[in-house]
Amino acid sequence: YVGAIAIEAKSIPPPWVGKNLPLEPVKGLWKFLRQCGRTLTNECGQVVYDYIFYVRDDITRDCCNKLMKMGEKCNRAAAYALSHVIKFKRWRGNIFERSVEAYNICLKGNGSRQVPKPRVHH
């Protein structure tokens, strides 16, 4: 979902590198997310992103394991950063609530056995 933030923000090329990052809502946030978000992978980041915005599928066990390894602090930081992308400001509360919900599903060991479906980006 760190990578998905980058895809949606359009100005943040994955994995959070480049010249056109939006202003940091909190000093040091981009560096922190670059480090902690590596664990999640772009594929699982997309699964979490889909869960937050589209409530598409359950989060897979594999992605849950990666989300747990990434950690709660990084998950909350990613939700915070995503909610500060201008295009998502009106969903700020939902973004945070759904990201915590996704983390808690994984924390309880309730990830699904399915493999994430590949998505085509336009």
Image (spheres, grey):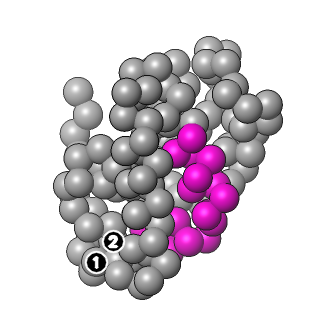
Query: Predominant secondary structure in magenta?
Result: helix
> The disc labelled 2 sits on which kind of residue?
Thr
Q: Which residues are magenta?
A: 63-80
Tag 1 and tag 2, C-beta contact below 8 Å: yes
Which one is earlier in the sequence, the residue at label 1 or at label 2? 2
The outermost residue toward the bottom is: 109
Circle 2 is placed at which residue position?
Answer: 60
Instruction: Identify the residue shown where x is 56% and y is 71%.
Output: 68
Instruction: Identify the residue shown where x is 42% and y is 42%.
Output: 93
User: Where is 22 relative to 122, above or below?
Assistant: above
**Residue 51 point in image, percent of width and height:** 31, 54
Instruction: Identify the residue shown where x is 42% and y is 84%.
Output: 109
**Residue 11 point in image, percent of width and height:** 52, 19
Q: Secondary structure at mark 1?
A: loop
Membership of 73 in magenta stretch: yes
The outermost residue toward the right is: 28
Circle 1 is placed at which residue position?
Answer: 112
Q: Secondary structure at mark 2?
A: loop
User: Where is 86 relative to 119, above or below?
Assistant: above
**Residue 1 point in image, percent of width and height:** 46, 47
Is residue 5 toward the left or the right of residue 15 in the image?
A: left
Within the image, what quadrant is residue 4 found in?
top left
Please state, as top left, top right, bottom left or bottom right, where the C terminus lies in the image. top left
